Amino acid sequence: MNLIQPIQQYRPIPERISRLNDLAYNLWWSWQPNGQRLFQDVDAALWEIVYHNPVKFLTEVRQATLETASEKQDYLALYDSMVSRLTNTWLLLQPGFPKPTRARRGL
């Protein structure tokens, strides 16, 4: 019996929505009001088929579907909002994550 699972292969995620992978592996999205929408709005039927598992979702979603989502302004607004909130509320609290610096005036 082989207990080692193969590494899951993702479809190439368009650059514009490339942080979907980061969100999929961080359960932070699951307690955000619009967290499920981030994946559901890409492919609602697939989201149900994979039982709301974002990692499985990214292995199963069609490349063309990701491309279409990356071109929709309403989806991009949701995506940008979620990525911004992830960075500003969760990641900044993690040890070792670079903190934003303010530009000094007069330099």
Image: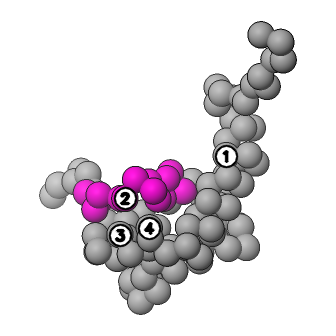
First in sequence, mark 1 or 3: give its number. 3
Quarter that holds the C terminus: top right
Residue type beneath disc 2? Pro
Label count reads 4
- CA–CA distance between discs 3 and 2? 6 Å
Front position among marks 1 and 3 = 3
**Residues at marks 4 and 2 touching, judged by CB atoms closer than 8 Å:** yes
List the residue tagged with mark 2.
14
Task: Check the image and report above or below for 9 versus 36.
Answer: above
Front position among marks 4 and 1 = 4
Percent x, y of residue 25: 50, 54
> For residue 9, which quarter of the picture?
bottom left
**Residues at marks 3 and 4 touching, judged by CB atoms closer than 8 Å:** yes
Magenta span includes 13? yes
SS at mark 1? Answer: helix
**Residues at marks 3 and 2 touching, judged by CB atoms closer than 8 Å:** yes
Residue type beneath disc 1? Thr
Q: Residue at x 38, y 75 (%)?
A: 68
**Alpha-carbon neighbours of circle 2 within 10 Å: few (<14), some, or many (≥20)?**
some
- CA–CA distance between discs 4 and 1? 20 Å
SS at mark 4? Answer: loop
**Alpha-carbon neighbours of circle 3 within 10 Å: few (<14), some, or many (≥20)?**
some
- CA–CA distance between discs 4 and 2? 7 Å
- CA–CA distance between discs 3 and 4? 5 Å
List the residue tagged with mark 1.
87
Q: Left or right: where does residue 2 sit relative to residue 88?
A: left
SS at mark 2? Answer: loop
* Magenta span: 9-23
> For residue 77, which quarter of the picture?
bottom right
**Rendered image: mark on residue 70:** 4
List the residue tagged with mark 3.
67
Residue type beneath disc 3? Glu
